[in-house]
Amino acid sequence: MTLTVRVISPDQTVWDASAEEVILPSTTGQLGILSEHAPMLTALDAGVMRVRAGKNQKDWTPIALMGGFAEVEENEVTILVNGAERGDSIDLESARAAFNEAQTRLSQVTDGDRQEQFQANQAFKRARARFQAAGGMV
């Protein structure tokens, strides 16, 4: 039995197909979903979702998620996110440059400025997710 997986962002549906397995970046860590998973609702952090569409263990598709929610119910996984990009549509070099820039910005934030720390950390998580989904190692 397979899962029906939908990844929906405000401007597009990034994935709408069957899958054997899904790994999600939840706010409490990585979360694996297989068929017959118990119903649940979870918050998602910015990170890389991985979808295994076929039976082959090498058929993984990475998708960069920018935070949101996932619902699992009756072999359907619905993922509503603020933004998402398939790894194969991300330019690796521009993702690497954005990651390096976000890493530099994060390292230069002063300890007392909580708002700037939060914004720099969120930008770093988004840049890291895009870089990882594009195939960069972090």
Image (spheres, helix red, strand yellow):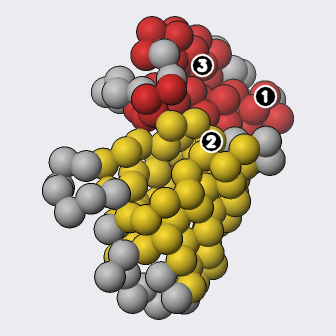
Neighbor class of circle 3 (other Cα within 10 Å; few <14, some 14-19, many 20+) is: many
Viewer-proximal residue among 7 and 99: 7
Identify which residue is drawn at 62% across, 41% down. 84
Q: Quadrant of the N terminus?
A: bottom left
Which quadrant holds residue 35?
Answer: bottom left
Identify which residue is drawn at 64% across, 16% down. 105
- Percent x, y for residue 43? 64, 66
- Mark 1 vs mark 3: give the one in front: 3
Identify which residue is drawn at 49% across, 71% down. 4
Q: Is residue 110 left or right of residue 92?
A: right
- Mark 1 vs mark 2: give the one in front: 2
C-alpha separation, residue under disc 1 versus residue under disc 3: 12 Å
Q: Is residue 28 above or below residue 135?
A: below
Q: Is residue 34 visible?
A: yes
In the picture of the structure, the residue carrying the numbered disc 2 is 84
Q: Amino acid at mark 3?
A: Ala
Q: Amino acid at mark 2?
A: Ala
Q: Is residue 59 above or below residue 29?
A: above
Q: Is residue 127 above or below residue 46?
A: above
Sequence-wise, which precedes: disc 3 or disc 2?
A: 2
